[in-house]
Image (cartoon, helix red, strand yellow):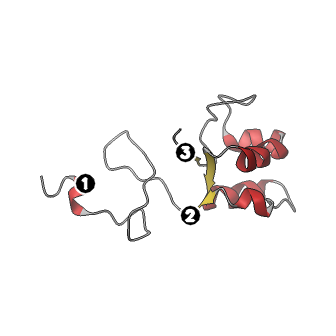
Amino acid sequence: MNKKIYEWNDKLEFGKYKGIHLDEAFQKDPGYIEKCLIEHADFSITADTRKHLEDLISGYAFSEKALKSVVNQKKYSSKPGESEFKLYPSGDPFIQPLDDIGFNE
């Protein structure tokens, strides 16, 4: 099972809000997204997405259990039209080893 890391504008790929952007689903049903973060090991969101979602609903804050599924990384694209998440040894997804971007080919 691969972990899917969502950003706020990604469409959900499962459940009752399948095909709906994450932030739209959150506004309709924040408890559902909270539950997904807690109960589904393959579902997580970025730290920026967490902040964006909490800002959508005044006074909302994710529980400590849900926060365990928040990751501190961002999307990057090494090839046109492709995006993926990858955390490099430096801890910064934007600092890539040169061979990973085809420099040493």
Give whichever of discs 1 and 2 has the lower sequence position.
2
Q: Which residue is mark 3?
A: 3
Residue 72 is situated, as x and y percent measured from the top left of the image, at 56, 63
Residue 72 bears which disc, if any? 2
Mark 1 to mark 2: distance in Å?
22 Å
Give whichever of discs 2 and 3 has the lower sequence position.
3
**Front residue (pair 51, 2):** 2
SS for dot 1: helix
Q: Are marks 3 and 1 in contact (CB under 8 Å)?
A: no
Residue 89 bears which disc, if any? none
Looking at numbered disc 1 in the image, what kind of residue is underneath it?
Ile
Q: Which residue is mark 1?
A: 101
Looking at numbered disc 3 in the image, what kind of residue is underneath it?
Lys
Looking at numbered disc 2 in the image, what kind of residue is underneath it?
Asn
Mark 3 to mark 1: distance in Å?
23 Å
Residue 67 is situated, as x and y percent measured from the top left of the image, at 71, 61
